[in-house]
């Protein structure tokens, strides 16, 4: 019996020596590092913007930079708003309305677009515009122009973030291509229309 008692006391002494050094070891939190070039990207959410657009509508085979008969140019205010789901895809709506014109031509446009985009650098992005829209051309002074058409629209652009919330952009939008319209003075005319816009957006 004495031997059993001594054995138990020896085991207790060994156990006490094991805890005499100061208790359990501290818990070390794991450190998670993100490899260079793989920073976590977050969506920017809603944004809104304003721009100035140079818009041209021309008959048959013209060009944005030509100045020929049958072309009508307007300066437009462009309002836009959208939602960015992530750095690579967004949706956007636009409205344009003319405030200057060549020959008393009023024009307005609305469109809704899917906006695929790609960040070249942290500040610089390129993007496309693919969607559906409608535009109206209303002639003045007996010009006989009265166009109200809709259809597929596309474009491309580039933007630059000057702060976390503000970006500048410039883009091209193909509003209509070979649109067959009837004018009372010239039936069955093919109309093309294009716009170049420069502006700024604010990310909420």
Image (tube, rainbow, N blue to C red):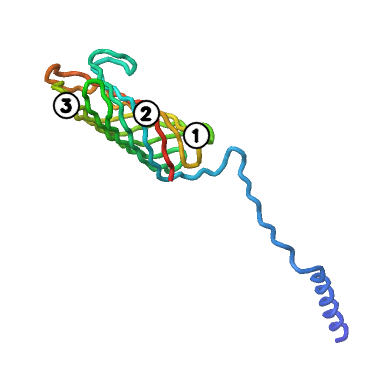
Q: Are marks 1 and 3 in contact (CB under 8 Å)?
A: no
Q: Which residue is mark 2?
A: 197
| Residue 107 to residue 32: above or below | above
Distance from Cα at disc 1 to Cα at disc 3:
41 Å
Circle 1 crowding by C-alpha within 10 Å: few under 14, some 14–19, many from 20: some
Circle 3 crowding by C-alpha within 10 Å: few under 14, some 14–19, many from 20: some
Distance from Cα at disc 2 to Cα at disc 1:
20 Å
Question: Relative to the observer, which residue lies in front, 131 or 187?
Answer: 187
Q: Compare marks 1 and 3 and give the one earlier in the sequence.
A: 1
Q: Compare marks 3 and 2 and give the one earlier in the sequence.
A: 3
Mark number displayed over residue 119: 1
Helix, strand or loop status at disc 3: strand
User: How far across and how far down the image is residue 72, in percent?
Assistant: 25, 20
User: How far across and how far down the image is residue 9, in percent?
Assistant: 84, 80
Circle 2 crowding by C-alpha within 10 Å: few under 14, some 14–19, many from 20: many
Which image quarter is the N terminus in? bottom right
Residue ranking furthest to the left: 184
Q: Which residue is mark 3?
A: 146
Question: Relative to the observer, which residue lies in front, 180 or 194?
Answer: 194
Distance from Cα at disc 3 to Cα at disc 2:
24 Å
Q: Residue 194 vs residue 171: left or right?
A: left
| Residue 55 to residue 161: above or below | above
Tell me the residue at 28%/15% (across/down): 62
Tell me the residue at 74%/63% (across/down): 25
Helix, strand or loop status at disc 1: strand
Tell me the residue at 50%/32% (across/down): 124
Front: mark 2 or 1: 2
Mark number displayed over residue 68: none
Residue 151, quarter of the rendered image: top left
User: How far across and how far down the image is residue 31, in percent?
Assistant: 65, 51
Tell me the residue at 18%/24% (across/down): 139
């Amino acid at each position: 019996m004495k031997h059993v008692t001594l054995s138990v006391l020896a085991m207790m002494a060994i156990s006490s020596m094991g805890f005499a050094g100061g208790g359990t070891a501290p818990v070390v939190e794991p450190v998670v590092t993100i490899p260079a070039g793989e920073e976590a990207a977050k969506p920017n959410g809603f944004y809104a913007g304003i721009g100035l657009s140079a818009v041209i509508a021309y008959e048959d085979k013209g060009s944005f930079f030509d100045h020929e008969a049958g072309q009508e140019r307007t300066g437009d205010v462009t309002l836009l708003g959208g939602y960015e789901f992530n750095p690579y895809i967004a949706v956007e709506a636009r409205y344009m309305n003319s405030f200057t014109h060549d020959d008393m031509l009023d024009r307005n446009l609305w469109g809704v677009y899917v906006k695929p985009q790609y960040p070249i650098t942290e500040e610089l992005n390129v993007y496309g515009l693919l969607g559906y829209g409608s535009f109206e051309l209303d002639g003045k002074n007996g010009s006989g122009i009265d166009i109200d058409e809709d259809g597929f629209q596309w474009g491309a652009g580039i933007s630059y973030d000057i702060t976390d919330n503000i970006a500048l952009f410039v883009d091209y939008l193909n509003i209509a291509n070979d649109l067959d319209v009837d004018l009372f003075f010239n039936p069955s005319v093919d109309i093309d229309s294009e716009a170049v816009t420069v502006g700024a957006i604010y990310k909420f």
